[in-house]
């Protein structure tokens, strides 16, 4: 009997997690990890975090998924990104943000004695899966844990996440999270 890998899945939001859970659950014992200090304002952070239990309640999952989250601490992102405000979307600021979130995921995975870590970030058509995977592999090597390669947008993953979000009535945000990516109202 094959034992499932114990995987810590960095989760940016419930809509992205909806499809990724479908993919990972057959081979993994998944814990969702919500660590996104880039999200502003505070109310948006909690809105996204608090949507995850809704997903877990409404989704037809074949196994129980645990949820691990952190309290809001935007200062860690702000301090890191302060000098990068003029960077274009997808530039150095975004790379540093990805690094921040995946590094904490790797640390938590090691501390929690997980077999591997992964991220939902590659389901987005706005994110560079090659870059995300490069960061993930480097951090895995540094922390002595396995990183699960992904490009969840392939095979219609993003569209499936939109479909599942509608089916479950999930809140879908209109921006990545940081103040720089926030649409002007």
Image (cartoon, rainbow, N blue to C red):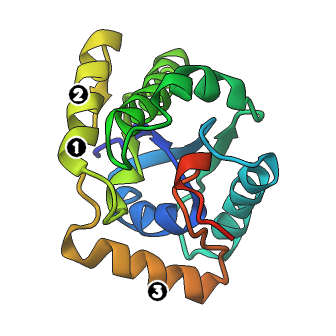
CB under 8 Å between callouts 2 and 3? no
- At x 38%, y 49%, the residue is 89
Give the spatial CA distance, label 1 vs label 2.
8 Å
Q: Residues within 10 Å of mark 2 (few under 14, many from 20)?
A: some
Q: Where's residue 165, x and y in %?
A: 56, 79
Task: Provide the secondary structure element on which disc 2 rests.
Answer: helix
Q: Taking 26 as reference, is 168 above or below it?
A: below
Quadrant (top left/top right/bottom left/bottom right) for the C terminus:
bottom right
Q: Residues within 10 Å of mark 3 (few under 14, many from 20)?
A: some
Decide which of tag 3 and tag 1 comes sooner along the chain: 1
Q: Can I make out residue 147 in this image?
A: yes
Give the spatial CA distance, label 2 vs label 3.
30 Å
Horizontal side, residue 170 vs residue 155: left or right: right
- At x 71%, y 63%, the residue is 51
- The circle on residue 149 is 1
Q: Which residue is mark 3?
A: 163
Decide which of tag 2 and tag 3 comes sooner along the chain: 2
Q: Can I make out residue 62 in this image?
A: no
Decide which of tag 1 and tag 2 comes sooner along the chain: 2
Q: Which residue is mark 2?
A: 137
Q: Nearer the viewer, residue 47 or 84?
A: 84
Q: Residues within 10 Å of mark 1 (few under 14, many from 20)?
A: some
Q: How many marks?
A: 3
Task: Provide the secondary structure element on which disc 1 rests.
Answer: loop
Task: Provide the secondary structure element on which disc 3 rests.
Answer: helix
């Amino acid at each position: 009997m094959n034992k499932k890998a114990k995987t810590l899945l960095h989760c940016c939001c419930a809509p992205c997690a909806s499809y990724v859970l479908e993919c990972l659950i057959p081979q993994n014992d998944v814990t969702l990890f919500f660590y996104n200090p880039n999200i502003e304002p505070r109310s948006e952070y909690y809105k996204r975090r608090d949507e995850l239990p809704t997903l877990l309640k409404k989704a037809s999952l074949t196994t129980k998924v645990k949820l691990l989250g952190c309290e809001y601490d935007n200062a860690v992102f702000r301090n890191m990104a302060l000098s990068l405000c003029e960077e274009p979307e997808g530039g150095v600021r975004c790379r540093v943000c990805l690094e921040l979130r995946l590094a904490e995921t790797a640390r938590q995975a090691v501390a929690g004695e997980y077999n591997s870590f992964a991220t939902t970030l590659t389901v987005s058509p706005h994110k560079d899966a090659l870059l995300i995977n490069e960061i993930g592999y480097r951090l895995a090597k540094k922390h002595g844990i396995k990183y699960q390669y992904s490009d969840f947008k392939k095979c219609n993953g993003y569209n499936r996440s939109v479909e599942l979000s509608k089916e479950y009535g999930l809140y879908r945000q209109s921006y990545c999270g940081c103040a720089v990516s926030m649409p002007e109202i």
